Image (tube, rainbow, N blue to C red):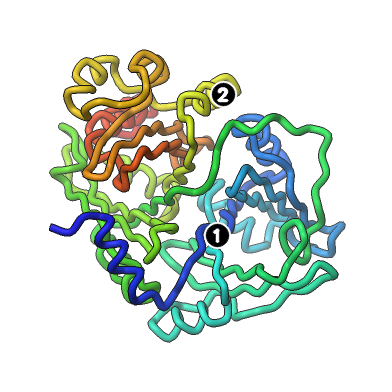
Amino acid sequence: MESTLEKLVQATQNDFLPLNGTDYIELWVGNAKQAAHFYKTAFGFQSLAYAGPETGVKDRTSYVLVQNKMRLMLTSPLHSDSEIAVHHKKHGDGVKVLALWVDDAYDAFEQTTKRGGKAYMQPITLTDEQGEVRMSGIHTYGEVVHLFIERKNYAGAFMPGFRKWESTYNPEPVGLLYVDHCVGNVGWNQMNPWVSFYENVMGFKNILSFDDKDISTEYSALMSKVMSNGNGFVKFPINEPAEGKRKSQVEEYLEFYEGEGTQHIAIATHDIVSTVKQLMARGVEFLKVPNTYYDDLLDRVGPIDEPLEPLKELGILVDRDEEGYLLQLFTKPVEDRPTMFYEIIQRKGAKSFGKGNFKALFEAIEREQELRGNI
């Protein structure tokens, strides 16, 4: 049986869409100014760039935040009839753009559209005194889009149309490094069609699969397949609901988001204990598994470098695969609708996604669903 590493190597050998990683993630939100303040205060992001009426953009405002290699753009509409306002009315705050960093945005568009990708943005070159950014884009599941961003000839803060955003309010970062993966929730029987899309249109490979036996509790289940580009820098697990006695977390998401969308963004850290402590101190709420999870943890995962007590105190989960182990923790949804949330992850060699934690994690989610009356 192929290991995850072998699958990635195989995918790299014939890579018609080379990706350097995630360029930025754009959320369409109700109030970008306030959302930016939240992400600075709670998650330790720093001000980077701004676009709006003052920069010549008349229909929206966008605030770009950065922490290490992760960029987050928060965009809200200035008029009720804009596509952003329509999107927000339907979905609430959520991910619109998963932007991918490429060496050639024009070629990325050609390669994906000729393989069946539906055009979202025709290739365009934006210029200012700092140079040029070339970009293009295609549609993916729900209303989420991938933009291809080529910025090798640009020296500015973010891209043309934005100005550097100076702020006197700059809370310390919390150790968030880069996007590890982004998970999409799709409708009943839609996982395999979207897996095919990522394979055929973008040249990704299915490196891991989980069925309802892997991801189930007494009451609910889901299925998931992890898609990765050739070098493993970009990974998109795709979830769909599975039959269960009660409503699964994916069904709850689809109901409240009113469609398919990005369920969570996983962000890497080198020190999950330090990062989570700081996030908790700033008011970020996390899911909690029962303390009994830790009773036989070391029997399940083997020796780890971290002392057990801080992990237990913070509720951090641990899992091991053939390449090493990982530590992970999931926030509660960060908006009023029970839709998008974040995962904090530290990899100690592991290439997988915490299969051994699924049952405990989903039972924790079910407890939250029960409190909301949605199970």
Residue 237 x, y percent position in the rendering: 34, 54
Residue 278's disc is 2
277 displayed left or right of 370: right
Of the image marks 2 and 1, the number of the one nearer the N terminus: 1
Amino acid identity at mark 1: Val
Look at the numbered disc 1 and give the secondary structure of its residue. strand
In which quadrant is the C terminus drawn? top left
In the foreground, 87 or 66: 66
Q: Residue placed at 42% from the left, 36% from the top? A: 346
Contact (CB < 8 A) between labels 2 and 1? no
Q: Mark 1: few, some, or many residues within 10 Å (few <14, many ≥20)? A: many
In which quadrant of the rendered view does residue 357 lie? top left
Q: Residue at x 28, y 53 (%)?
A: 240
- Residue 360: image location, x then y, percent: 25, 29
Amino acid type, label 2 = Gln
Relative to 243, residue 357 above or below:
above
Residue in view at x 34 percent, y 36 percent: 326
Q: Can you tell which mark lies on residue 280?
A: none
Q: CA distance from mark 2 to mark 1?
A: 28 Å
At mark 2, the secondary structure is: helix
Q: What residue is disc 1 on? A: 97
Q: Is residue 292 above or below residue 243?
A: above
Q: Quadrant of the N terminus?
A: bottom left
Left or right of 115 on screen, residue 128? right
Position of residue 298 measured from the top left corner of the image (x, y, whole percent) = 22, 22
